[in-house]
Amino acid sequence: MLIWFIADLSPFIIFPIIWLSIYKQNTSIAGFDRTAIITYYLITAFIVQTCTSHVGGIFQRNIVQGKLNIHLVRPLSFISFAFIHEFSYRLISFFPVTVLAIIIYIFFPDYFRLPSSPFTWILFALVCLIVLTMSHLLEMISGLTSFWFGENKALDNFIYFFYKVFSGAFAPLAFFPIVLQNIANCLPFKYLAYFPAQIFLEQIHGYELFYGLTLMIVWLLILALIVSFLWRRGLRQYDGSGI
Amino acid sequence: MKTIKKYWKIYRVLLSNSFSYIANYRNDAWLMLVMNTVSLLTTFVIVQVIFSQTNSIGGWTAGEVYLLLMVWTILDELVSVFFNYLFFLPEIINDGSVDFYITKPVSALFLISLKYFLWRAVLRILIDVVLFFVVISYFHLEFYWLNYLIFFILLPFSILVLYSIFLIANTLAFWFQRIDNINDTIRNYFSFARYPLEIFSTKTRWFFYSFFPLAFTSYIPVAILLKRLPIYWAAIMTVFSLTIFSLAILFWRYALKRYSSASS
């Protein structure tokens, strides 16, 4: 777990360094000053570590190896089991990441901007829960395709690549060319990193905030419907091989 | 000479076995090709986003950064192609399969390192090499012939450095059993070499030239090619790569004595 933790942190080390080298020439880029960009990467690192699900592989293995049979006869549904499993794992990740964030804040206060309003803290916490659920649903969609294809590595990788570019985890979407920003606006991925980070940085208010939250909930419902559909159809397809 | 012939004969058998293996998974090979191309495109998009806000990073222009990125990608692929089985070392130490290699009348490290040639990645490398020349042509990069020659001579030494790092890291599995993901971690951090080291502070750069020697992978050859480093760095890199390779071999030999053969 520690090695994965260290591995996952690498992009959040290199990209702030690259941007800081660019800030030697500019004081602000697309509304982000030096402090805002560092805070942005720290917050996206926090979100990636604590709110990003990796449950797709569990679904794939259970379906392909026939281990799903055991879960089908248990009183707790496999979907609930997977969510609790992932939620516990993320809860464990929460503590080292939070301690790391506190240490960074103590030693580098100039590079970490905290929200001024308590409302922002509460909203950010709630949005993080939605992010975890959305990420979990996306992973489940990838995993559930194993009912038909067996191996879901390709779809899993494609979802990851879209996530990588359009979530804003590697650079704020405001830095992207307009075409890519428009594509990102049509996809659910920006709600997994960029939008929560904007909330934390208090860059989004009023109608824009309400509109963003509404769209986030809409995406959550769409993803939940897709999962429900795939699960019901998939179970009909499932032959329990591997018994 | 006789030993070289013997090992070459064994390697030809390993190549043939690897080809038979990959022939069973042709669809997977195509899928991986598509995924790697998408992955490379993703990195291109990220670099493009960076350069949409600036003309240079660490004093390097877009063309120079793309060149560095392509060289890193090619080196990374080459290491995966030739030494793929080395990444399974923690797994075979844990399940005791190392027995199988140390009881053979050839070097165990030779067998473990070169057992599996990743044929499916050969096409990817060819695409990467084409992209390398496309970058040179598109950005009108021009090089002095001597720097070009030294650049190509240094590439095998870059691979040697990467191989040595992966060997040292995977050999740690003799002490720490569950470190299967160490390769992803190393790859993630060594991929910092896709960007010019000038973006880092002087202290960090010193670290990248010594304890965490990512400067000796793609950075130094490309910096020499672009005349950003004097040519004598080629000699430093040669000495460094041979030294780290020797240390990696010594560490492997030392670690092998600790092997307790879990399967026996």
Image: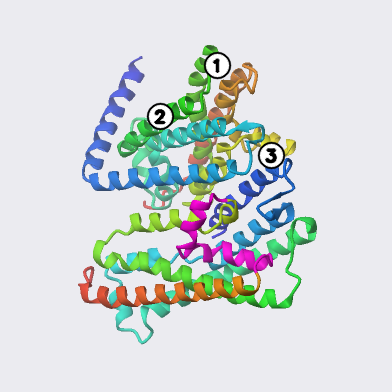
CB-based contact (under 8 Å), mark 3 and mark 1:
no
Residue beneath the point at 22% across and 38% down: B20
Q: Position of residue B69 (x, y in %)?
A: 51, 35
Residue A157 lies in the magenta-colored region: no
Tell me how far mark 2 sits from mark 3, CA to CA.
28 Å
Using a 10 Å C-alpha cutoff, classify the residue at mark 1 as few (fewer than 14 neighbours), some (14 to 19) or many (20 or more): many
Corner quadrant of residue A20: top right
Furthest toward the top, the residue is B146
The residue to which callout 2 is attached is B129
Residue toward you, A72 or B65: B65
Residue beneath the point at 74% across and 47% down: A27
Mark 2 or mark 1, which is nearer the start of the sequence?
2
Which chain is mark 2 on? B
Residue beneath the point at 59% across and 19% down: B234
The residue to which callout 1 is attached is B147
Q: Position of residue B82 (x, y in %)?
A: 38, 33
Q: Is residue A67 left or right of residue A241?
A: right
Asked if both marks, 1 and 2, belong to the same chain, the answer given is yes
Tell me how far mark 1 sits from mark 2, CA to CA.
18 Å
Residue toward you, A14 or A85: A14
What segment carries the magenta color? A176-204
One can see residue A114 in this view: yes
Using a 10 Å C-alpha cutoff, classify the residue at mark 3 as few (fewer than 14 neighbours), some (14 to 19) or many (20 or more): some
Q: Position of residue B73 (x, y in %)?
A: 46, 36
The residue to which callout 3 is attached is B200
**Disc number for residue A157:** none
Q: Is residue B264 left or right of residue B234?
A: left
Which chain is mark 1 on? B
Task: Specify the amino acid type for callout 3.
Answer: Phe
Task: Specify the amino acid type for callout 1.
Answer: Asn
